[in-house]
Structures are given as C-alpha cells and as structure tokens.
Image (cartoon, rainbow, N blue to C red):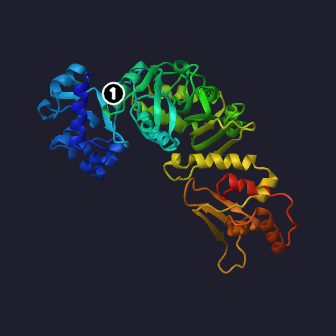
Amino acid sequence: MPADLLDRLRDRLVESDYSIDGVRERLGDVAATALAREELVPALRATRDRDALGVLIRLWWLGVPVPAADVPLDVARLVETGLLVAEADGVRATVHLQPWETGGYVVSDRKVRPGDPALRHDHVVGAGGASANLAQLVSRRPVERALDLGTGCGVQVLHLAGRAERIVATDVNPRAVELAGLSWRLSGVGDVDARAGSMFEPVEGERFDLVVSNPPFVISPRERLTYRESGFEADGFCRDLLRLAPRYLAPGGRCQVLASWLHVKGEDWRDRVGGWLAGSGCDGWAVQREAQDPAEYVELWLRDAAEQGTPAYRERYDEWLGWLESMDVTGIGFGWITLHDSGALDPVIRVEELTQKVELPVGGYVDDVLAAIAAAHRVSDEELMAACLSVPDGVLEERIGPPGADDPGQIVLRQIRGLRRTTSVGTVEAALAGVCDGGLPLRPLLAAIAELTGEEPYGTPPESIRALVAEGFLAL
C-alpha cells in the first residue's frame, strides 16, 4: 500500500473527525446504540445528508455503497489498491475501517450481518468487546519487549505502542498480519515486528517482558473460522498457551490473556483452570467473569457468524450441542488469566469468580492485585504479626440488621474502587479494620481486641486476616 495514499487517507479521517466521539456525535445516541446491536437503519437515516463525515461512516463503518463523487478521497487509487471496489451504484469498501479508543484506526474484514454470504475461513474480525476487555486488563507498566500473540486486526499493538520499546506481533493467519499492518500504519505506529505462525512458533527461543493474547478461545467441534477457533480439542488451546508461556517470559515478565474453559460434570472448574497454571513456576491469577450454559454458548457463536436463519443453522446447533454433551459439559466459563514470573520458589495460584462491575482499566492496578495475592501467601505468621496494616482507600463497612437492633446480623466490608469485592467478616475482623491505620503492629491490636471480646490471646494471626490482605481489604 503506497505510503502517500495511506497518509492522505489518515489525514482525511482526522480532518473529518472520523473518531469514536465524532462518529457517536454525528449519529446521535439512538442511532449509535442501534448500531451497537448491528441495526443499520437509524445510522443510515442519520447520515443521509452525505456530508464528509457521514459519507465516511457509510463507506467504512456501515459498509454500504456510496456515490464515488461523494467520497472525499482519492477513489481511483483506493480502487487500484483493493480497499474500494466499484459497483453499479457507486463504490463499496472491501474492509471495515473503524476508529479506536487510542486515537488510531483498526482495519479488518467487513462486518458480517444477517443475510450476508458465509464468512471466509481466514476472515479477520474487527476490534470488539473482547479486544477492549484485554486492553483494559493489561498492566500499564512500561516494558522493553512485548509480544502480541494472535494479533488479528492489530488492535492490542495500538495499546502497547508507547509502553513497549519493541513489539512483536504474530498470527497464524497471513491475511491478519497484512490487515494489522494497515491498522498500524494508519495509526502512525511503526517498527512492529510482524510474523506469521501458530502459537509461539514464530518466537522460539525469545523472551518477553509482556505477552498479551486474545486467542482463538471458542470451544467448538472443529475449526471453521481461524479468528476464533484453533482446531485444538475442546479448551486445549488456552491450556497449552498458558503451559508454554512461562518459557517465553523474561524474569519478572507477565503473560495476560483472555481464555475460556469447560465446566464438566463432576469437576470443579477451578481445579481445571488451576491445573493449567500449576507447575508453571509462575504466580497465577485466573478470574471467571461469566459462564454460559451449552445452549447459550452455541447460540452466541452461531450469531457471531451471522448463521441464524440460514439453512445450516439447526444442523450446526444440534451437532455442536451434541458434541458438548458427549464430554459431559455443563457450562463454559470465560475470563482473564495472568501469569507473573516473580522468581519465587513457592508460586501462588489464585482462581476465583468476579462477576461484578470493576473499576477500569484493571491494568491500572493489576500489579497491586498480584502483589497483594503474593504477599498474603508468602508472609510468615511472625512477619504478619509484626506488620503495621492499613485499610486502603475505598474500603467501606456496612452493618446489616433489623432497625433498632443492638448488634448487626451481618458485617460486610465493601470496596468501592478496584475490583469492588465484598466480604462478610466477624467481629474481630471488623474491629481490626476499624483500627488499622498503619501505626501499630498487628500483634498488640489483636491483643487489645481479644481483651475487649473476651477471646483467648492470639499466638498466630487468624487465617481470615491473611485472606483480607490477599483480597485488598487490608494492606501490608
């Protein structure tokens, strides 16, 4: 793609305010919200005046033909390069070009909508909810070398640019590498080392300070679409990615990925995911953000490929559901997993479910979360008793009980920042949270609380205190 043509395209996009905010303002709330549901009619109505921004929205985002004379671009050259194609009623974009929250642009194959032809096997999907989730999760700390494994349309690189001195991006799909390159060039991101290949094959023998991946985590009977399905058995791709990742991490490095996993009859999903991380030599934190039953899951991914209403819909639905039933699958979980090569001889693995809304970006405080989990695991009883604990900002106490009752029926600690956890505590823990200000060690505080409550003095800290440290209700 000629550099001057891309420069002119980018300049025109910027001049026309083809940005996240510009598009939303131009469309209005009703049309923008409808577009998020893949309903085009309100957006088409909102852009029928055919001003420059409206034409760009129709061309690149909505994917409908527009008269060539209305397009504020070098149409002939864009047709020559294949980004546009001439049709009887004008020109149509062959790609989806969307503004992204970083201020850059993401190039992918056109969005698929009901009634469109079936997706090609090497379809390159655009940036969406999963892309945004991963970008929100990744640590904000600067790094020297970063790897985006399974770059797709290249969106994670847009987030890594400026935080990583060197970026390597890989994808098994050569077409994804090609379109990702357009995303980076349009966004002014240079010097990305792009390589084609599966899993870690393109970076064998190399190490990175940060590995991020939005992998093909969809669990299906076979690989039909490269962007979402790996061809591995069940959830084996995510398992193998996490088992292999530690050998590609530099000391102190982190691997942060999205993943999905099976819920199997007679098995705790926590044991399944924890088993992926055990033996890695890294600290691990896995979070299930949501879970779906098999029917919900199959319907979601058939909709994703716009297969509802097609002749093959029922057959594929039945085959997929039967395949899951053959493995005694009761549900499918989805969430985040982080590995940290901390260098510790006793790695800690924490697997939990967090379905509440959390403060974004998680990457702004994820290092603190990992540090708290590790500290709670590794601090000795004696060290904990000598520690001057404090209550972090954003922790509130709630007392629940009938009106007028002398004592609450339940005491809850609640975080209004960060992961926004809640936990029920007993009298000792509540009293401790009320006096921990970083001024006195834990030992005399527990002694005073024991005297007030008539309890036996504490020789070692209650295990509940260690749990409150791990979850961020108390800080060392």
Give the residue drawn at x 64%, y 41%: 285
Furthest residue to the left? 69
Tag 1 secondary structure: helix
* Residue 325 relative to residue 190: left or right: right
Q: How many marks?
A: 1
- Residue 69 is situated, as x and y percent measured from the top left of the image, at 11, 32
Give the residue drawn at x 75%, y 57%: 464
Looking at the rendering, in which quadrant would you find the C terminus? Answer: bottom right
Give the residue drawn at x 38%, y 33%: 126
Furthest residue to the bottom? 404
Q: Quadrant of residue 47?
A: top left
Q: Toward the viewer: 437 or 19? A: 437
- The kind of residue tagged 1 is Leu
Q: Quadrant of residue 12?
A: top left
- Residue 94 is situated, as x and y percent measured from the top left of the image, at 28, 26
In the image, residue 332 sits, relative to residue 233, either above or below, namely below
Q: Is residue 334 visible?
A: no
Q: Toward the viewer: 67 or 7? A: 7
Q: Is residue 338 visible?
A: yes
* Residue 111 relative to residue 410: left or right: left
- Residue 203 is situated, as x and y percent measured from the top left of the image, at 53, 21
- Residue 427 is situated, as x and y percent measured from the top left of the image, at 75, 68
Disc 1: CA contacts within 10 A as few (<14), some (14-19) or many (>=20): many
In the image, residue 20 sits, relative to residue 451, either above or below, namely above
To which residue does mark 1 refer?
Answer: 182
Q: Toward the viewer: 349 or 354? A: 349
In the image, residue 458 sits, relative to residue 230, either above or below, namely below
* Residue 415 relative to residue 96: left or right: right
Looking at the rendering, in which quadrant would you find the N terminus? Answer: top left
